Image (cartoon, coloured by chain):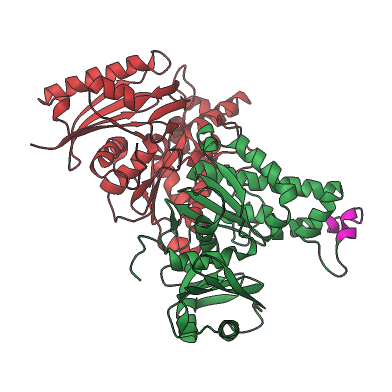
Chain colours: A red, B green
Amino acid sequence: MRKLVLGIDIGATKILCGLLDWEGQVLAEERMPTNSGQEAPGDTLDRIARQTERMLLTWGVQVSDLNGIAVACPGPISYPEGVVLDSPNLGWHNLNLRQELKTRFNREVLVGKDTDLAALGEYHFGQGEKVRHLLYMTVSTGIGGGIISDGNLYRGIAGGAGEFGHMVIETGGRRCRCGRRGCLEALASGTAIAEQARELLARGPGSRLREYSLPGQSLTAREIGAAARAGEREAQQMIERTAVYLATGIANLINIFNPGKVVLGGGMLLGLQDLLLEPIWKMVRAGVFALHRESLKLEITSLGNNIGLYGCLALLKYGVKNEPVK
Amino acid sequence: MRKLVLGIDIGATKILCGLLDWEGQVLAEERMPTNSGQEAPGDTLDRIARQTERMLLTWGVQVSDLNGIAVACPGPISYPEGVVLDSPNLGWHNLNLRQELKTRFNREVLVGKDTDLAALGEYHFGQGEKVRHLLYMTVSTGIGGGIISDGNLYRGIAGGAGEFGHMVIETGGRRCRCGRRGCLEALASGTAIAEQARELLARGPGSRLREYSLPGQSLTAREIGAAARAGEREAQQMIERTAVYLATGIANLINIFNPGKVVLGGGMLLGLQDLLLEPIWKMVRAGVFALHRESLKLEITSLGNNIGLYGCLALLKYGVKNEPVK
């Protein structure tokens, strides 16, 4: 029988469930809102279980037929227990995701941090040359990352590795939701751009950026990108500054890890790649040591929004070596 | 016969050679100046070979009796070739250290970056609980580091990993010798403190720090430390600022790696540990995520100035797993 897996990618605003075969073909997808803060986590998990089982049924598949189930979820998630600790994005606190889903599906479920699994998915299913040491960075509402060291997912001692967004690159800079100042996430994430736009508009009516906002909505990185493409100087400056910060963070990581490849993803970066990628790549190459530059590739993920599903498949198919016994 | 190894730790100003037994006892040590810039690299290596063979002879040991020879050297060193590329500290360029020493000793020599081997030495011979994921950071003339991932040395794709000093933590800050601005090394190394002291004195005769300088010599981190201990406010402020920068860099690394332990070493840090360690530790603990903090130890190396020799022994005794074929 064809080997099939169920991948569940829980995001801050939406949940993506996918039925994949062992080779990485996505046979079916199901999207639903996360409704975080609007319902109890248990209700969200109930919805996930109900809707995925319905999706499976249209393919004539039972949960017991699956080769495995894996779930990607925003951190912090304790490792190896799979407990969602204190998630600012989901509003979940000390939720034993692994156990809760196991009960609902009546079988074992593997749990991973979304950015960790994205890195694992990119390593195993991404395009281009395979390198032993790979970093994945997502730039979206927040900024996070995953580390592949020697072809293996590096999770850190308790599952907290890869918090690239919480690297201070401007001591004393903008306050970050983590409590520190000048974190990359506070300077260059989608949230940071939206905040900067709001501050700019609050300073006075002169800004022409207002024209780009949707009625009744605040400006987001998407509109700032549109304004920059239309030649608005204020928006272009915001994008340029964002590129400087992202390049600084990426160059830092390259000097620290000397990876063979850095792969970028995330909604904001994918949406603004025409504006951001070239200046970032140029500054990164200029900033790192020659030894680090020579063997370096910088890429955009080819897996798009499905990177989390590929991460789930990669976790089930290839696993993670040298993991402590659970 | 007792298993013996020869370790050679090449530093910017001095070279330390040691005869160690397999269990980590240092039987003999020999120190010599590096004379970098004053003699050809080949002459320096000739001196190393001559003096270590003399040291061995006083112990009745021939080079051929040794269980191995390893050398620790400042980077950048290409990996796996062992070529010292463009060393600002040594003034060596494209020197095939492995081959050059192999010729002189007439046997194979293992080569490692000094900070990499220090991390490996700390992991295998350091005191305290052994953890799978360990970071070593040295704060001295420069700032560098080494990464132990899953009990194994992580060198990166070309041997360049661990350049913790070249992490920008203050975008647009002080110019670093690497070409970027605001690198940790440009802000918090021994060189950075000496520069700040020089600038302070140049600003006017008011500073009382002048009294702490030795006749005809510039102020170094050592004298700034003495002045801070004696209650000089300017020196105390310099130390406080240094602690903030070091804590920022260390907290960044903890958020990125989620290590079980961070070990600090290096001449400047060991010399000023009574002033620096407590504020650094306090700020680091306050800055990182709870998940990262819970499983974290922060220590000063117990191996002191011999950490490089222990690194050489560790490389010979335990090696590095999963290394590409040389």
Q: Establish if B99 lies above or below A46.
A: below
Q: Residue at x 54, y 32 (%)?
A: B290
Quadrant of image for the C terminus of chain A: top left
Image spot of residue A174 (x, y percent): 61, 34
Q: Residue at x 28, y 53 (%)?
A: A128
Q: Main secondary structure of the magenta part?
A: helix
Read off the magenta span.
Answer: B199-212
Quadrant of image for the N terminus of chain A: top left
Asked whether B209 falls inside the magenta stretch, the response is yes
Image spot of residue A121 (x, y percent): 30, 43
Q: Nearer the viewer, residue A19 or A111?
A: A111
- The furthest residue to the left: A1
Q: Describe residue B214's horizontal placement relative to residue B28 as left or right.
A: right
Q: Nearer the viewer, residue A320 or B180?
A: A320
Q: How many marks?
A: 0
Q: Nearer the viewer, residue B19 or A82?
A: B19
Q: Establish if A241 lies above or below A207.
A: below
Decide if residue B183 is in sight here: no
Q: Describe residue B33's horizontal placement relative to residue B82 as left or right.
A: right
Image spot of residue A269 (x, y percent): 41, 39
Q: Nearer the viewer, residue B285 or A181?
A: B285
Asked whether A183 falls inside the magenta stretch, the response is no
Decide if residue B36 is in sight here: yes
Image spot of residue B160 (x, y percent): 48, 61
